[in-house]
Amino acid sequence: MRKLAVALCLAGAAVLMPAAPAAAVVPGTPGDVAFIRGGNLFVAEPGGTVWQATTGGGYEWPRWRSHSADLAVLKDGNLWVGSYSTSDHAFHATQQITSGAVVGAAAWSPDGNRLAYAQGSFAPSVYIVDFGPVAPSARGLTAAQPVRVDTRLSPQAQRIADRLPKKTQRAAAAAAPTTWHAARNSLAVAWSPDGRYIAYPNGECFAVFDDCLGMIDLTTGNEVWVAAFGGGGATEDGFATIPAFTADSTRIMWTQQTRPRYEADPQISYIKTMSALVTDPFGSQSQVGAAGEYSAVPSPAGGTTVLVTSGRSGVAWVARRAGSTRTWLYQGYQHDWQSLP
């Protein structure tokens, strides 16, 4: 169960026993790309045509529902569900999931029946909304009640945590260093295509480390950490956010930025994308693409192709990374890649 330092933010929350993993889906066909530009939702077709799907601003973090035109998206800080229409090329919101909450980018279960998101500014909790196996025409219209997932460190992770020095609680700095990327504050979650894992930042491992990324195993409720910084004897400060899984669920990717803890003049590194085996997250870590690329979304078809965000002439662009080749696609950020049957 959560350590006391984390549990204070969870009082009064509902508790869900470990959930059975959602039904897995086979790798799909890459479809449209949803992304944000200037606070509005845009959708790019595979052929390259780009449509502005919203107006008025306030939109963040679109996430496609598997094998559908449905999207979960943040609007003015709250989570909404709706659909993108190919007839008028607009996003039509149908249901508000949160109200007045601190939430991040959501993640759909592989079968599209459930939606997970992280909530909480101190140490977030994961909530799952069960929409049920409804007809595609009715998706997003049914009443849904978010329920918190109860987690605990896996026995192996707990043994490691018990040996590490616990972090000390300290007052937050008045302002974050300007050289840290804004992705540091992301609460984005990811659901593995095989249905087994949900990855999210600052879970159980937050009791030991200052920043961390963990994975909940939905078959057991156990959490293992993928990357961890500060506290616990770690040699680096930093963060690991915006997780994503490859289509075959064998690897997890995330956005990372670090700084040495004990150097006289520690320099913050460039933001970058990291990747590791789900079965060996610490021992198999490697960088994907070039420094400065972040928010990786692997291709729904599998393989090594990913979409990333990077700076181009001082402006954020969505690019396609395939091995050593980077192709600039659309001006924008916070992208997601639709998976079609």
Image: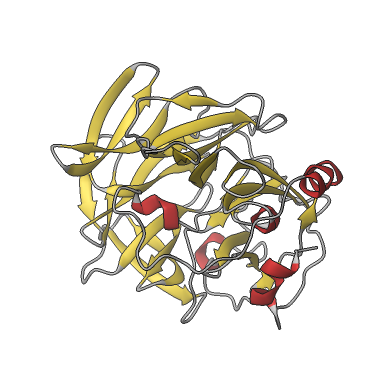
Q: Can you see residue 118?
A: yes
- Relative horizontal placement of residue 51, taking residue 60 as reference (left or right): left
Decide if residue 255 is on the left or right side of residue 5. left
How far across and down, in percent of the image, does residue 51 sit?
A: 22, 52
Q: Establish if 202 lies above or below 121.
A: above
Residue drawn at x 50%, y 35% is 300
The image quarter in which residue 167 lies = bottom right
Q: Residue at x 81, y 49 (%)?
A: 162
Q: Quadrant of the N terminus?
A: bottom right
* 224 or 166, nearer to the observer: 166
Vertical comparison of 130 with 332: above or below: below
- Residue 335 rendering spot, x and y as whole percentages: 36, 47
Quadrant in the rendering for residue 279: top right
Outermost residue toward the top in this view: 324
Q: Which of the pair 73/253 is nearer the observer?
A: 253
Q: Is residue 151 left or right of residue 44?
A: right
Q: Nearer the viewer, residue 319 or 43?
A: 319
